Amino acid sequence: MKMQSPIAKNTPPISAAKLNWSDLRIVLAVARAASIKGAAQHLNMTESTISRHISAAEASLNVHLFERTPTGMRMTAACEDLAEHLSRAEAELEAGLEAAANRHGTAAGILRMTTVPTLMNHVIIPAVPAFLRRYPRVELELIGLPADLSMMRREADLAVRLSRPTSDMGALTRSLGQLEYGVYAGARRKGSHAETLPWITYEKGMAGLPQAKWIAQRASRHGEAIGALRCNDADGLIAALRAGSGKTLLPRIVAANVPDLEELRGHDGLPSRELWLLVHPNLAITKRTRVAIDWLVALFARSAGPDPR
């Protein structure tokens, strides 16, 4: 339920011309970060400066915008409404600046993109030089994290996720198909004894991943050994393969960009995972976002299966 904000009776209409737009930018940053500290870090300002701007905005609007709580800053109902409009205005402004900066309509500006480190390091980054040659006025900020950043709070502009979205439900989503897996070993270990290699899998806290489950079931069903080495991400598995420690599952689109790996054929029922693209709806109007979406769709189409829907 939205919190109610007291507004003084007989409050005269607010004129946008009299507002300090810097105050509003900071209101939006605090709303997204849900804390003064987070907004200060994002805007490279001091917390006291952020607090002063919030107070100034509340005085100008004659509206209480935030409630301080033990966990941070909670928006009032009035602030929730205001933040929604400010977010749309920000996107329109970015689109206008982009158009003004280049009268020919070429994509320009900064894009923050996030996905898991393995896809970032082995799929997206190798394809970046060609993208930037085509769109030299675009700047990319690439964030490889296992955790999901929020599109709606503008922690990132675009996200590629390995499952159907269950958060950021206000974001635009598009299926990128399926991430297909294969069994791989280091090239120098491939050969007649490949079937005897131990499985390298994920650490116990990640045993619920589809690929970790497949390895456990396969090893149990066929009496195959699971090695003593476990990793917390696929890049660790890749390093282990190249060191000759065993065999494991990897996305084929990732393994294709890693030297010294060979796929071991003859494994049935290999897993796959859904790939989804997320973008804030207000950002979809910018040229730089549209060309990045087209680029990512084409990039991941190399490993995509049928649309999961």
Image (cartoon, rainbow, N blue to C red):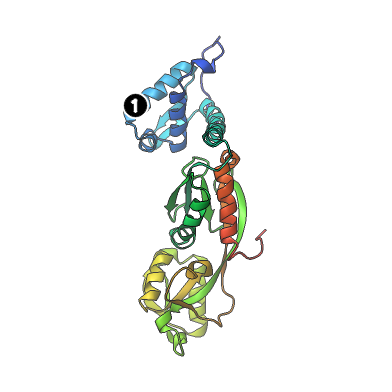
Q: Residue furthest front?
A: 104
Would you say residue 205 is visible in this rendering? yes
SS for tag 1? helix
With 272 as the anchor, is 137 left or right in this view? left
Camera-nearest residue between 50 and 202 = 50
Position of the N terminus, as image quadrant, is top right
Quarter of the view holding residue 89: top right
Q: Residue 90 in the image: x percent, y percent? A: 52, 32
Camera-nearest residue between 78 and 86 = 86
**Position of 78 relative to 148 (above/below):** above
Position of the C terminus, as image quadrant, is bottom right
Q: Residue at x 55, y 49 (%)?
A: 292
Q: Residues within 10 Å of mark 1 (few under 14, many from 20)?
A: few
**Position of 243 relative to 4 (above/below):** below
Camera-nearest residue between 99 and 259 = 99
With 243 as the anchor, is 206 left or right in this view? right
Q: Residue at x 53, y 70 (%)?
A: 252
Would you say residue 164 is visible in this rendering? no
Look at mark 1 in the image and give the residue it sits on: 49
Q: Residue 307 in the image: x percent, y percent? A: 66, 60
Question: Given the image, on which type of amino acid does mark 1 rest?
Answer: Thr
Q: Residue 235 in the image: x percent, y percent? A: 41, 65
Q: Residue 101 in the image: x percent, y percent? A: 51, 35
Camera-nearest residue between 308 and 117 = 117
Q: Residue at x 54, y 31 (%)?
A: 93
**Position of 173 relative to 282 (above/below):** below
**Position of 161 relative to 234 (above/below):** above
